[in-house]
Image: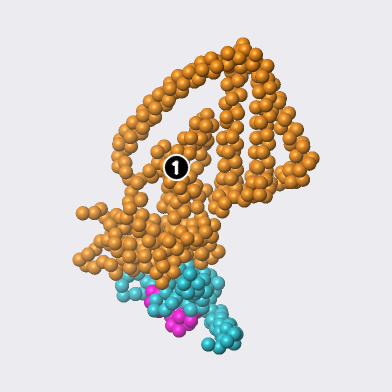
Chain colours: A cyan, B orange
Amino acid sequence: MGIEERFSAIRKGLLEFLLLKIIAADKVYAADILKELSRTEFATQEGTLYPLLSKMRREGLLDYEWKESEAGPPRKYYKLTAKGREHLRNTSDYWQKINGTIKGMGPNS
Amino acid sequence: MNKVVTIHLNGTPFQLEEAGYDALRAYLDHAARQLAGNPDRDEIMADIEQAIGDKCRAATNAFRTVVLAKDIEQIIAEMGPVDDGSEKSSRAETTPAGSDPTTHAADNDPAGSGPVKRIYRISEGAMISGVCNGIAAYLNIDPTIMRIIFVLLAFVTLGGMALAYFVLVLLLPSARTPAEKAAAQGAPFTAQEFIRRARAGYYDAVKTFHDKGAHREWRRRFKHEMRAWRRNFRQEMRAHSQQWQADWHASWSQHPGAYRGFWFTLSFLSAVRAVLTFVWIFALLSLLTTGAVFGIALPAGISLWFGLLLLCVAYVLFSAPIRAARHVLLRHGWGGPPCVPALFGLWDVFVWLGFLALLIWLADRYVPQAHQALVNLPPALHHAADSIKHWWAQR
């Protein structure tokens, strides 16, 4: 099992965190999110993204608004809610803590 | 020249090549099924349709208005399998880094990832109604082997298996939708799989008979052939059995004193059958209460009710020779004078029941496990009935 595969569950778990970060930066369209992720190890497809976005919206972390586009029907632009921003802060802190723990453990390489 | 299908995706019309349409239809059907129970299903489906629409728009221009099948392949591959993200999220997982999803899912254990495998009748390439085909796909063996096993069993069980076949025809659902077809094969439902099947004309099988006339003609011919085959078979069997009877009488009439052995043999056969029945009942009980037969657990991927079915088949299989021997004895005697079948039949049943009762009593008394199994029987039966009901409700 390669490192890619070993970490697939972890990447999946972290995807929500990354979405929060991306959406926090700017109001984005789903295709923008995919483009941003496509350059990283977290490359994702629509089939995964849409259900996740809708789950996060249901949990009150984000919301969307419709915007006209030059080509085709109006698009959904996502943005964070207050709860989403708080969740992002908490997740960020927790991630820092985990990183610290990993660094502090075992021999330093 | 290819046929074009006009569809609309979330309100915007598109023209698709027919093969592309089939693949897209299968993809969306599966997506909708995957999201069943998700409160936002309709919204997610609309999002997905719109995303596909955007990609279709990018694939066309003023001079090229039709979305080709290969465009759709590309689009489905880009979209990736729809993944509910909740408890069943691990199924059909693809790493975008590009590991091949078909082999990926195939190496995993059948219980874990991969779609839930279920028995369906598969009419593509079926001989009669696809029962053997479906079971073969479920057990992952060659359908021809399954058919041979079925035919052999039908002979050994004196037609019992043929009866079971027709019960299965009624009982097993036919795999109609693409998702059901995938569940029948246990194949992973990924974009690549859709494309492969759409390419292989997998979904064209339904269209083989374009007009009703051809279909009717085919069925008429099939029935005609089956009838002729049955007639032939019966005639041959009758001729053979007369031959066997004659042989049997010829060999036994040389031992006139053997008549006394008749009662003994009949009782012995009944007793053996009682032991078999006892072992069978005990096996059923232990499967119901502990999920294992004499300490041997069912292989993963075979459900409880299928295990029970297998046990029944095994019982019929083992008791068939005894039944056949008793049948011959009762019908044709022991080479001596013809006997009174009703009386012997009654005697036989009494011996069988009596011996069975004795065995169960002994087991209850001296084998703690058997006693435990008997005590556990009512809740176990309840549980089994529930699981069967649950299975029924799921289909």
What amino acid is found at the position of numbered circle 1 in the picture?
Ile
Which structural element holds mark 1? Answer: helix
Residue pushed farthest right?
B365
- Please give left or right for residue B63 compared with residue B155 in the image: left
Q: Which residues are magenta?
A: A20-36
The majority secondary structure of the magenta stretch comes to: helix
Residue that carries the numbered disc 1 in the rendered image:
B145
Closest to the observer, B195 or A17: B195
**Does residue B321 sit above or below B312 in this rendering?**
above
For the question of whether residue B50 can be seen, the reply is no
Q: Quadrant of the N terminus of chain B?
A: bottom left
Residue at x 68%, y 24% (from the top left corner)? B267
Closest to the observer, B392 or B221: B221
Spot occupied by residue B12 in the image (x, y as percentages of width and height)? 33, 63
Residue at x 60%, y 41% (from the top left corner)? B311
Spot occupied by residue A35 in the image (x, y as percentages of width and height)? 38, 77
Using the rendered view, name the quadrant where residue B271 is placed: top right
Subunit under mark 1:
B
